[in-house]
Amino acid sequence: MDEKKIIIIGSGPAGYTAALYAARAGLKPLLFAGPQPGGLLTTTTTVENFPGFPEGINGVALVMNMQKQAVRFGTELLYDSVAELELTDGAAQTVITANGERFSADALIFAAGAAPRWLELPSAGKFKGRGLSVCATCDGAFFKGVPVSVVGGGDSAMEEALTLSKTASDVYVLCRKEALKASKIMISRAEETPNIHIYYSTEVLEFLGEKNLEMLRLINRRENRETLLPCRGCFMALGHDPNTGLVEKWLKRDEKGYILAVQSPVHTSLAGVFAAGDCVDARYHQAITAAALGCQAAMEAERYLAGKQ
Ligand SMILES: Cc1cc2nc3c(=O)[nH]c(=O)nc-3n(C[C@H](O)[C@H](O)[C@H](O)COP(=O)(O)OP(=O)(O)OC[C@H]3O[C@@H](n4cnc5c(N)ncnc54)[C@H](O)[C@@H]3O)c2cc1C
């Protein structure tokens, strides 16, 4: 079995930032890139809100830069997925890869992200990144002065709609149920915004358009009536599924499956195991916030390892 000081699981902004800090601290981290090398940013085109790139930067290029920087300072990168963990409270942390290899370290940073939920429609694949999005903060600015829609009925749908209402001409909130499940305050903010229109009992049947999204085919289930809605952007506000199945047996998680942070935003319920990025942060889901948590996790892990010596 290979012994290391620190193992990092995940190669998104959280994992690579943790690796950069750990490597520069001389900890020679071992990083598992997992099933999606580069993480969620590899599924987008231009990232305009990561500081340091005034013209924006392609998502893949951004994360490849992070990888280069982490490797330059001594991160060892393995393109394996972790299949199983054996975690302890303050002793060795063991990772077992999909092909059965075991690696142990005194500290572990878990940065496996969270998968956004998309509408499972056959026509969705064609328009991902061409009108379909899961993040108004990330992509809202690409839809200035045109109609957009938000799918969902909870607080995050209201937040997305309010964000989009500042730039889009009109925002259509498409709520499957007969009532929104968002909080009263968020509902009244949305209702008071003149360019937000809420459609109840409404589902998307199909995304339509030549190359980019142009139109939605909708159905009102109560009236059993189909309509076409011109719409250039459609934002899913259906929540995320944190990739925390691997730690279910070992770490405390909240009711949605996010790792529960104790004592600091990156300490978990086990000493020596730290969490960073979208798998521990149910609220922000941004590259910069994931990177910031990666930095914190590495610094806390460094302190923890120093304390053990
Ligand atoms: C379409 C889209 C566009 C976006 N645009 C923006 C934007 O413009 N600006 C912005 O700030 N944010 C944007 N985001 C959000 C941003 O991508 C995420 O907040 C960020 O990537 C989260 O970083 P992370 O490191 O926590 O997780 P992720 O980037 O999700 O990375 C998770 C990593 O964990 C690894 N992993 C998972 N399971 C295992 C396993 N079993 N073994 C080993 N590794 C594993 C995966 O391979 C992956 O490398 C966008 C998201 C999407 C989906």
Image: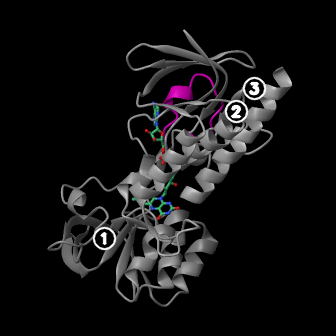
Determine whether the residue tagged by mark 3 lies in a helix, strand or loop: loop
The image quarter in which residue 144 lies = bottom left
Numbered tag placed on residue 154 in the rendering: none
Determine whether the residue tagged by mark 1 lies in a helix, strand or loop: loop
Of tags 1 and 2, the one toward the viewer is 2
Numbered tag placed on residue 26 in the rendering: 2
Of tags 3 and 2, the one toward the viewer is 2
Which residue does the image show at 83% across and 20% down from the upper left?
309
- In the depicted view, which residue is nearer to us: 227 or 141? 141
Q: Position of residue 64 (x, y in %)?
A: 44, 50
Where are the magenta residues, as a range? 242-257
Q: Is residue 52 above or below residue 32?
A: below
Q: Earlier in the sequence, mark 1 or mark 2?
A: 2
Dot 3 surroundings within 10 Å: few (below 14), some, or many (20 or more)?
A: some
Which residue does the image show at 46% across and 71% down from the upper left?
56
Residue kind at label 1, given as amino acid type: Gly
Q: Residue at label 1?
A: 131
Dot 1 surroundings within 10 Å: few (below 14), some, or many (20 or more)?
A: many
The image quarter in which residue 275 lies = top right
Q: Residue at label 3?
A: 271
Residue kind at label 3, given as amino acid type: Ala
Q: CA distance from mark 3 to mark 1?
A: 43 Å
Residue 267 visible in the shown view: yes
- In the depicted view, which residue is nearer to us: 72 or 239? 72
Q: Quadrant of the N terminus?
A: top right
Residue kind at label 2, given as amino acid type: Gly
The image quarter in which residue 3 lies = top right
- Please name the predominant secondary structure of the magenta segment in the image: loop
